[in-house]
Image (tube, grey):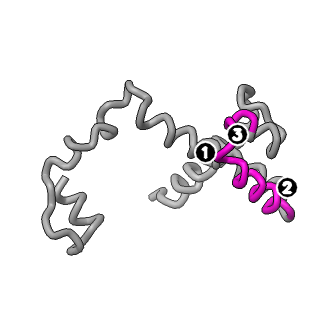
Amino acid sequence: MLEAQKEAYGDCLEEYHPLFWASKLHFFITGVPFYNFPYTFGYLFSLGIYAQAQKEGKGYEDKYMALLRDTGSMKVEDLAKKHLNVDLSKRDFWEEGVKLCIKDIDEFLEATKN
């Protein structure tokens, strides 16, 4: 833990905490979704949005800005239907985002081959 903190923060911390990991429950409590689910959902949702933006190209920015304006006042399912024309209970939207992750992994593996 100390080595990881020193690598990440360099000389910026006044002190390093060897048990930092133990004070952050999300590092090891994976069976309870209160912490990890929102981050995972948000990540996958943003990937789905990005996948759509790549397909639609120019002009997507206006659609995205409209989506952002409604994020605080709508359920995510309604938001996605209104602005992205997708049903979040269907796999298609999610799978398009996951394909981007797989592509990144494939590129990384290719770049790190010996």
Q: Report helix, strand or loop for mark 2.
A: helix
Left/right placement of residue 23 relative to residue 92 reads left
Q: Amino acid at mark 3?
A: Met
Q: CA distance from mark 3 to mark 2?
A: 24 Å
Residue 102's disc number = 1
Q: CA distance from mark 3 to mark 1?
A: 30 Å
Residue 66: percent from left, percent from top: 78, 55
Q: Main secondary structure of the magenta part?
A: helix
Residue 38: percent from left, percent from top: 51, 38
Q: Is residue 13 above or below residue 84?
A: below
Callout 3 touching callout 2 (CB < 8 Å): no
Q: Quadrant of residue 96?
A: top right
Q: Is residue 38 visible?
A: yes
The stretch of residues the image draws in magenta is 59-78
Q: Amino acid at mark 1?
A: Ile
Q: Which residue is mark 2?
A: 56
Residue 24: percent from left, percent from top: 27, 43
Q: Report helix, strand or loop for mark 1.
A: helix
Q: Which residue is mark 3?
A: 74
Which residue occupies the foreground of this view, 33 or 98?
A: 33
- The residue drawn where x is 55% and y is 49% is 105
Q: Is residue 72 above or below residue 8?
A: above
Mark 3 vs mark 1, foreground winner is: 3
Residue 13: percent from left, percent from top: 20, 69
9 in magenta: no
